[in-house]
Amino acid sequence: MTQAFDAAAQQTLLESRSRQAVELARKLGADACEVGASVDQGVGVSVREGEVETVELSRDQGIAVTVYLGQRKGSASSTDAGEASIRAVVEKAIAIARYTGEDPAAGLADAALMATHLPDLDVHHPWALTTEEAVELALACEAAGRGKAGIKSSDGASLSSGEGVRVYANSHGFLGSQRGSRHSLSCMLIAEDDAGMQRDYDFTSARDPRDLLAPERVGESAAEHTLRRLGARRPATGRMPVLFDPNLAGGLVGSLMSAIAGGALFRQATFLCDRLGDALFPEWFSLQEKPMETGAMASSPFDNDGVQTRDNLFIDKGRLASYMLSAYSARRLGMQTTANAGGARNLRITAPLASRDELLARMGRGVLVTELMGQGVNGVTGDYSRGAAGFWVENGKIQYPVEEFTIAGNLQTMFRGLAGVGSDIDTRGSIHTGSWLIDEMTVAGG
């Protein structure tokens, strides 16, 4: 195992280095300065066919300095947070700023918006795990999956465990820091029949290792997912309902957030420009951000500008209620920051929930999609086209697996055509949602 990680000591050191960088920047003539520093340490192991494949012990650190000379901005960074490196980074940032053009939107977020409520959000749960113990857990996970009848071989099981510290400071006098941890275990398996080979996987992820699923359960679930794909065919071609599995429905939420992000808006590179107040979803659907949720995967009391985070209601009873803005993008748009520098944190849906069986019955005939391939989402037009695999549904019941087909539509039409949200909520990431039933998309199969 790599050397012990003293999170408290690292936090104290990075806070001191960040203050030092801000003070030096002001001393060297910067009108304003902001600093982001981080250090992370972890262990990752992978096994395959009962043998250890890789063991990786990692330690990454960095410090980034941004200075402002009036409305000219310069940034520089280093992987070394030592005193000599900090001076070099600050001097480089100032030199860069002298040669950049003026940007009326450049500068720190307003001092009055800096976070003052900085509670412990219970996101730091280190795992005293030796390399040998990590290997044993990964092997147990894979063995449970390989032990299922019908599984031919394994593509491997992987375990990762890490913790770190991040610090943000600026010349308003703000300094915020947070310790965090993240742990995960995954397994991918291969099955084969006369029609060919199929592979699938499952995983578990949590801030607290005690919240991870048992290794055996992850392996068994990966095997179940793999075996149910045997005998896959191509579906019929036509216009029909599509049910997105929860982890894929989270991707649709991600596409929405990308479309309402300030950077896309001020560049006019989104289909949701000038749409505040418009009905995008059915009125029973709302989407909220809860960045101060205790123990959640993306919780933080301050954003990457140092602004106090707060609950944001992005979709209110179907209508677009807010964009997602940093201080910079807000200035470009003539608006106020929503404390979203660095993105959204902990997205939660409010909607009447239905079971998987209820959604299938509502669907009648169509496809349940469990895997998507490709990057076919056009943020400018909203056009959506992805390769897919999943299951054919007839009379409200899953009939057989399907593969090698595409689903296509437009996000605006898909959002308006949301016909149901499932109670099978996936809580492994920062977006919590169940399955999404879209009333009609184009399915192109055989």
Image (cartoon, rainbow, N blue to C red):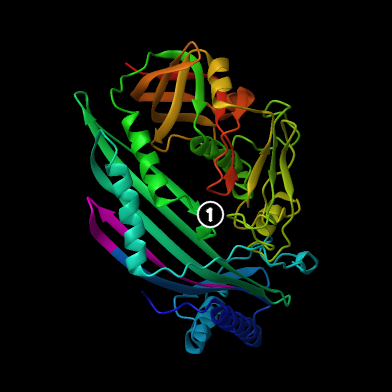
Task: Write down the region rendered in magenta.
Answer: 36-54
Q: Residue 188 vs residue 35: left or right?
A: left
The x and y percentages for residue 131 are 34, 68
* Residue 319 placement, left or right of 345: right
**Image quarter of residue 232:** top left
- Residue at the spot 60% in from the left edge and 53% down from the top edge: 343
| Amino acid type for the residue under numbered disc 1 | Asp
Which residue has dot 1 on it? 211
**Local SS, label 1:** helix
Where is 150 relative to 300, above or below?
Answer: above
Viewer-nearest residue: 64 or 46 = 46
Residue at image position (69%, 50%) is 290
Residue 184's place in the image compared with 321, above or below, is: below
Specify the principal SS of the magenta part: strand
Q: Position of residue 63 (x, y in %)?
A: 52, 75
Q: How many marks?
A: 1
Residue 116, position as x, y percentages in the image: 77, 69
